[in-house]
Amino acid sequence: MPVAKPNPIAPLDPTAAEPFYRQIYDRLRGAIDSGVLKPGDRIPSARALTKELGLARGTVEAAYSLLAADGYTQARGQAGTIVTPGLRPRAPIVETPPINSALAATSFRPDSILPFQMGLPALDEFPRKIWARLGARCFRSMQPSDMVHPPVSGLHALRTEIAAYLRVARGIDCAPSQVFVTSGYRHTIELIAHALLKAGDRVWVEDPGYPPTRGLLKHLNIAAVPVAVDGDGMIVADGVKAAPDARAAVVTPAHQSPLCVSLSLPRRQALLDWASRNDAWIIEDDYDGEYRYVSRPLPSLKSLDRDGRVLYAGTFSKVLFPSIRLAYLVAPESQVERFEQITHAFAGGSPELTQSVVTAFIKEGHFARHIQRTRKLYAERRAAAVTGLESVLGEHMRIDAQPGGMHLILRFHGNQSDRQLAARMRREGLYAEALTNWTMAGDGPSALLLGFTNIASQADAEQLGRRILTILQA
């Protein structure tokens, strides 16, 4: 049976020249023409509308009779009155204005699952049965005390597990009190900015670098100072020349985002020395440091910090799944009280049930085993993706050699525009990001960024490569 829609009739105007029955008719017809009410939808009954509008029954029935006479509605007895099935909207088609290229930038939080999509772990390999079992157990054990507002800094048990994991896996010696659970990277940066920075400050950012960082700083009235990147990561000397008095630097030392190079040890030491001398802060975004395929994962920059200048930002989005919306920040011990004040002022806390499941997942060893499995899996899938794409596109591009990460960098021969090619791929159902969109000036060498973690085999990569080839030839 068709389900009644919410009342689409806007308040009637008693001062209008049109009688009430005509106003009702015009509003319902407009809702049908615009598609708010669709063929087969039930409209409010005359009795219900009479009561709601406080009108005479005959007024409403006059409007309904006119709708039926014009073919907009049909009476179905006890099923009520519905919009005529098969009726086509009659509203004029409004031509969409051209899209401003600045507003049509790539979304860095896509809600799709497309081939080559960036930022997605291998969703087909996530241990959903284990996760469901842990979730059911947490549901069953939930007490009234678990249903109040969650602690804004994060569940203590989860903070403890994160601190223990970081000590073993990333070489970071920190207490649970230094760990602050957030809802994602953007939330992490926002907390840092509120706690340690102010409007008008300047902050070094990698160029090319993760575009949302620049957007966040801009909204906070903090100036992003681009610092070039080469094969050894951020060129610290360039940052010192451009803005020696900067208040902070945002870096991705393990796998530079997006070039995937690692910050060399001399550069790490130079960055730490600069921060110490200038009383500045270093924000280490370790978004996928677990995934290095040529050797063991590198120790974090935070593990080298002796003066308490590094803030370590990690996330569960890349190792578990993005919709979990959980990340974490390790604050310097000297700034714990300040961050507690800021989280109480600006944070609402992440869902406690989700944190409980993650806590159990880590505590029982599933987290470490999952990372070990996916590290091996990604090395295999990366090799398969490279081989498959090169077999089809080898004459048109080359793929950068990278020690780790979760995406490939395809550099095409000739003067191919990476933005145009990425846009064409999107229209054909393939995900791609243009490297030039990751630069401050929007220029530089053209290249495509393609995620490989959900490409299961070389055959799949070859098939996708042929689709890219068709787009190139078109």
Image (cartoon, rainbow, N blue to C red):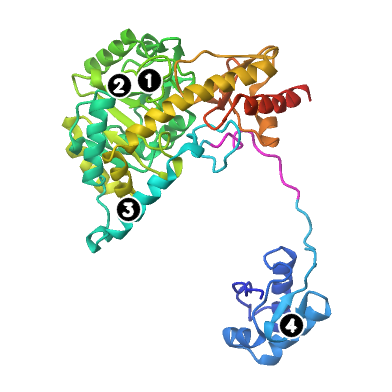
In this rendering, is residue 148 above or below 57? above
Cβ–Cβ under 8 Å for marks 4 and 3: no
Classify mark 2: residues with Cα within 10 Å, few (<14), some (14-19) or many (20+).
many
Question: Magenta part of the protein: which range?
Answer: 95-107
* Residue 2 x, y percent position in the rendering: 66, 74
* Residue 51 x, y percent position in the rendering: 58, 88
Separation of residues labelled 2 and 4 (CA atoms): 69 Å
Q: Is residue 96 magenta?
A: yes
Q: Which amino acid type corresponds to the residue marked 3 in the rendered image? A: Leu
Which quadrant of the rendered structure holds the N terminus? bottom right
Q: Which residue is mark 2?
A: 300
Separation of residues labelled 3 and 1 (CA atoms): 31 Å
Q: Which residue is mark 3?
A: 353
Q: Which amino acid type corresponds to the residue marked 2 in the rendered image? A: Ser
Q: Which amino acid type corresponds to the residue marked 4 in the rendered image? A: Arg
Q: Which residue is mark 4?
A: 76
- In which quarter of the view is residue 396 placed? top right
Q: As rendered, which of 273 and 77 lies closer to the eye?
A: 77
Asked which secondary structure carries label 1, the reply is: loop
Mark nearer the viewer, 3 or 1: 3
